[in-house]
Amino acid sequence: MEKQPRLLSSQLLLKSRVFEVTLNRSLLTWKEIQTKKKRVSGGAHNTFKVGSYCVPVSEIVAVRETEVDSRTKDEGRWQKMSQRSTEGYPYAFTVSYVERARQHRWRCSDVTFHCSDGSLCLQWIQTIREQLALLTSRPKHLLVYINPYGGKQQGKRIYEEKVAPLFSRASISTDVIVTEYANHARDHLLKGADLRKYDGVVCVGGDGMFSEIIHGLISRTQRDAGVDQNRPEQKLVSCGLRIGIIPAGSTDCICYATVGINDPVTSALHIIVGDSQPLDVCSVHHNNTFLRYSVSLLGYGFYGDVLTDSERKRWMGPARYDFSGFKTFLTHHYYEGTISFLPATNILGTPRDKTRCRAGCYICQHNGQLLSEDGQAYKTDEDTFHSEYGSDWRVIRGRFLAINAASMSCACPRSPKGLSPSAHLADGTTDLILVRKCSRINFLRHLLRHTNKGDQFDLSFVEVHRVRRFRFVPKYCEGDLELDLREGGRGLFGHICRDHPACGCAPVNSSWNCDGEILPHATIEVGVHCQLIRLFARGIEEQPMFDDPCVPSVI
Ligand SMILES: Nc1ncnc2c1ncn2[C@@H]1O[C@H](COP(=O)(O)OP(=O)(O)OP(=O)(O)O)[C@@H](O)[C@H]1O
Ligand SMILES: CCCCCCCCCCCCC/C=C/[C@@H](O)[C@H](CO)NC(=O)CCCCC
Ligand SMILES: [Ca+2]
């Protein structure tokens, strides 16, 4: 590695011990200089360097001047000790920086260096601030939306107690909007907000709140660019503003799968250091009409039914998913239909390989570049999109307990490796998982493998395909019968069977769970838009963190 020129180097005091503190363009390091009496004649002193610590400049949150306790002049015992320990070093500055803890958790730690003279202290503060000012990817002004009713209804408290103090320490200014109704944030982004003022948008809430934010931002971007969202094959314009997620919801899947943990402080620090993680977005259409965007799970059958049931039990909080999950598992409904899909070819990675999407993912970079350089990839998809029976499309007709499209792993605290553990955040594909009708015990085996180390795809009734586009038509909508039971015939067949599970006939319709929202149609067409949005995140960092030379620890 090329050696960086030193900007500053001084002997400073830290916790009563002398350190050689050095700043270059990329690192702040401090090495202890220990003076020990040597047991040789003459009693000469020998200098040893012991602990050595470093922090990347990119992970420094802030630096500030620190008052050296003036009360040390008092007579109290503690103050006297304090005075003695910093004697000759009456000035101090404190550096706040990112420290890695267990399981992808980040913490903001402080280290205070004491200086012998005031001008040296100010020089250190000024030089560190100059280096931080060069980090242009850091946000300065953010628009924050808080859902006070998400998850355990702690969003406001989490923001005020854990996040706002960190933003203010990092000199980030904010405009905060506490939402007053569902879709408040979406509509404000779409119609009201002056987005030129901001470097990013922060969402305090769960996946549903995040969904509101991306709908506002993506739709606003398309509208400003004159792009029609209703055309399924339309190439969309990517959003300029990054989005930060402060997790305060029930599942927090998008935060967990992009950071590795759902922890508000960790997420706030990823925003402060200006991380950037591109994310694929699926557009969902019905009959050439735009329905919704999805970044995590599009699930028909099991996950659609869990969501439908759980929406009636919002009062239960996050536990509603466990209750409805168990209930839906017992009902064991299957659904008939036709799924057609365009497999993602000529790319790196498969849904059953052992690679995992991690920070700086090579597969995402490679596949993303292929798509952006070679506009052909999109053209080819468009050409084949309308020829349903074109050679590239595959068509599968069957009875399914679940049809899941995972555009990312969908890892969350309930399922730490996710619905599709090898899915990628930004590779331009989604993993289409088809779970065919099988016995309850077999379905349970599949579900339980979402929560343990087992391979959920290594079962005869499960198949998985990495795709760019797909379509689903339930059996009751096939042929000329374009009747959508949600609108027209719901009360006829579907309703009877739902209310009479003992009658033995399967209900014909389920609903799509689109990132935790119920879609109003079962017949849908879906296309993946590679890296359409960016988050203040960097992907999940490889473990173990503790061997990283830039973690402040003894080198
Ligand atoms: N002020 C509000 N009053 C009522 N609903 C709101 C308000 N603000 C946002 N919402 C809606 O609340 C829904 C749920 O919010 P959120 O995603 O934050 O929590 P959650 O559902 O508990 O978590 P998850 O989506 O992770 O399961 C969202 O769909 C959002 O549109
Ligand atoms: C016998 C029961 C076995 C249960 C097996 C547990 C398997 C857990 C897998 C969890 C996968 C979550 C995928 C994420 C989906 C989110 O976009 C969405 C919005 O937050 N959450 C749900 O729909 C909430 C979905 C919650 C499902 C339980
Ligand atoms: Ca993807």
Image (spheres, helix red, strand yellow):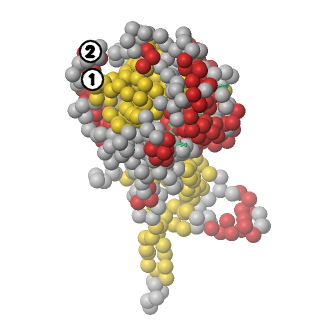
- Quadrant housing the C terminus: bottom left
Please indicate, yes or no, whether residue 500 appears anywhere in the rendered image: yes
Rendering coords of residue 395 (x, y %): 30, 24
The residue at 28%/33% (across/down) is: 367
Which residue is disc 2 drawn over?
387
Question: Callout 2: 10 Å neighbours few (<14), some, many (20+)?
Answer: few
Residue 385 found in image quarter: top left
Rendering coords of residue 466 (x, y %): 32, 33
* Mark 2 secondary-structure assignment: loop
Please tell me which residue lies in front, 407 or 80. 407
When the figure is inspected, residue 464 is found, relative to residue 494, above or below; the finding is below
Residue 41 found in image quarter: bottom left
Question: Callout 1: 10 Å neighbours few (<14), some, many (20+)?
Answer: some
- Kindly check if marks 2 and 1 are in contact, taking CB atoms under 8 A apart as contact: yes
Q: Is residue 550 left or right of residue 352?
A: right
Which residue is disc 1 drawn over?
393
Please tell me which residue lies in front, 94 or 172. 172
Rendering coords of residue 287 (x, y %): 42, 11
Rendering coords of residue 479 (x, y %): 38, 12
Please tell me which residue lies in front, 458 or 360. 458
Q: State the CA–CA distance, disc 2 to disc 1.
A: 8 Å
| Residue occupying the far bottom of the picture | 41
* Mark 1 secondary-structure assignment: loop
The residue at 47%/61% (across/down) is: 553
Earlier residue among tags 2 and 1: 2
When the figure is inspected, residue 19 is found, relative to residue 185, above or below; the finding is below
Amino acid identity at mark 2: Ser
Amino acid identity at mark 1: Trp
| Residue occupying the far right of the picture | 75
Q: Is residue 331 left or right of residue 427?
A: right
Please tell me which residue lies in front, 271 or 252. 252
